[in-house]
Image (cartoon, rainbow, N blue to C red):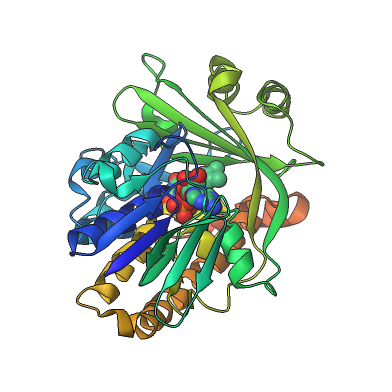
Amino acid sequence: MRIVVVGAGLGGVAAAVGLHRTGHEVTLFERAAELREAGTGIVVMPNGLRALDTMGLAADVRGRDMQAGLWGLRDRLGRPLLVTDTAQVQQVVGTPAMIDRADLHRALRAPLPPGLVRTGSPVERLESGDTEVTVISDGEPVARADAVIVADGIGSTLRAQLFPDHPGLRRTGRMDLRGMLPRPPGMAPDLLVSQLVDRRSGAMFGLFPVGEDRLYWFTDSLLDGTPPDADEARAQMLSLMADWHPLVPELIEATPPADIHVDPITRLAEPLPSFASGRIGLLGDAAHAMPPDLGQGASQAFEDAAALTRHLTGGEPADVPQRLLSYDAERRPSTSRMMRAASRQSRLTSQTGVSAWLRDTLLRAVPSRLATRQLATLWQA
Ligand SMILES: Cc1cc2nc3c(=O)[nH]c(=O)nc-3n(C[C@H](O)[C@H](O)[C@H](O)COP(=O)(O)OP(=O)(O)OC[C@H]3O[C@@H](n4cnc5c(N)ncnc54)[C@H](O)[C@@H]3O)c2cc1C
């Protein structure tokens, strides 16, 4: 079948490879002038890796498996709140990969034949007919397809066109900073793979290793108005986190502003009514943008890509709408649950005052067996 994928982010590229490998005639439209993914790190959870496996895409990503160790929530001074030894979980559900985003994107797009990708091609509109969809860019029809996969990310304009009554994105009133830097020599491993939370400000600092020699860190804190530039945001975090575990301000300070990304945290106000509209299917952040707190956004996009590939395998143009409805029935309930869980996790880590004190007290009392089971559920998704 002729299949157009709109958006060459992590989800769109994975879907394009999966669909191409199962024999479809795929064209991937990307508005940016070149295929690439902006810096910093990302965690691919075991469920995301399993989805990539089904499309033959995980080999290069699995090389960056997280080493067994401690994973969990700590207070701002680095003292454990809910810390789990991951060795047991890894044996049962597998190991996440911690990887540079640019390397992940490169590994995913490597199998795509160059002729299949059209960069510098923003898709403006999709016109649905009974037997095909026409893709419009720069006011001109640029392709006709039996199916179109919309993977244009969190700010998707096509989502808004397909579901004009949906309320769209909602800002959470928080912002994130992300940075990556060389791992300081001799750094103690105890804080690796941790999220530190502060019950005074409700801010969070997360940290994990990327390969042997780099660290990826991220923060989550209140946002008043529009996000500041990287210089100002870095200064704000240094002041907010000055009396946290000494490693926190040290790492922020050691990261040049040019290597820091600042974004307001947004999510879909509510789940979409469907991931399918006739011959058009949605995947990834376009379908289910969620707060980043569970590190599941890309892994869910990979599960979407794998499911779409499966549902469209062996299909005929006439049965595309029915097959996309089956895809919707498989993916929407589980991604809606994940959206709710990510919002809950965001509320949990950003609590302040008495409720944060209560949270910390309860988390410290959780038996390790329960903590291990909770982590396994999160990774298994
Ligand atoms: C701070 C933070 C940390 C995160 N950490 C993790 C993590 O550890 N693990 C994880 O799994 N997820 C994480 N996520 C989420 C993850 O990054 C996203 O869920 C994932 O990148 C979504 O991929 P996507 O392909 O759906 O969209 P995107 O990666 O946004 O790709 C969309 C693509 O579409 C293109 N595009 C847009 N409009 C058009 C158009 N009209 N025509 C053509 N092309 C278009 C864009 O240029 C872009 O290339 C995090 C997110 C944030 C904000």
Quadrant position of the N terminus in the picture = bottom left
Q: Is residue 295 visible?
A: no
In this view, the residue in front, 343 or 370, is: 343
Locate residue 308 relative to residue 216 in the image: left or right: left
Residue 78 point in image, percent of width and height: 53, 34
In this view, the residue in front, 291 or 52, is: 52
Residue at 73 percent of width and 26 percent of height: 236
Q: As displayed, is residue 128 above or below residue 252? A: below
In this view, the residue in front, 168 or 370, is: 168
Q: Residue furthest right?
A: 225
Q: Is residue 85 visible?
A: yes
Quadrant position of the C terminus in the picture = bottom left
Residue at 39 percent of width and 38 percent of height: 35
Q: How many marks?
A: 0
Locate residue 337 relative to residue 201 in the image: left or right: left
Locate residue 238 relative to residue 112 in the image: left or right: right
Residue at 27 percent of width and 50 percent of height: 95
Residue 58 point in image, percent of width and height: 22, 49
Residue 94 point in image, percent of width and height: 24, 55
Residue 277 point in image, percent of width and height: 50, 78
Q: As displayed, is residue 358 above or below residue 98? A: below
Residue at 33 percent of width and 22 percent of height: 213
In this view, the residue in front, 236 or 365, is: 236
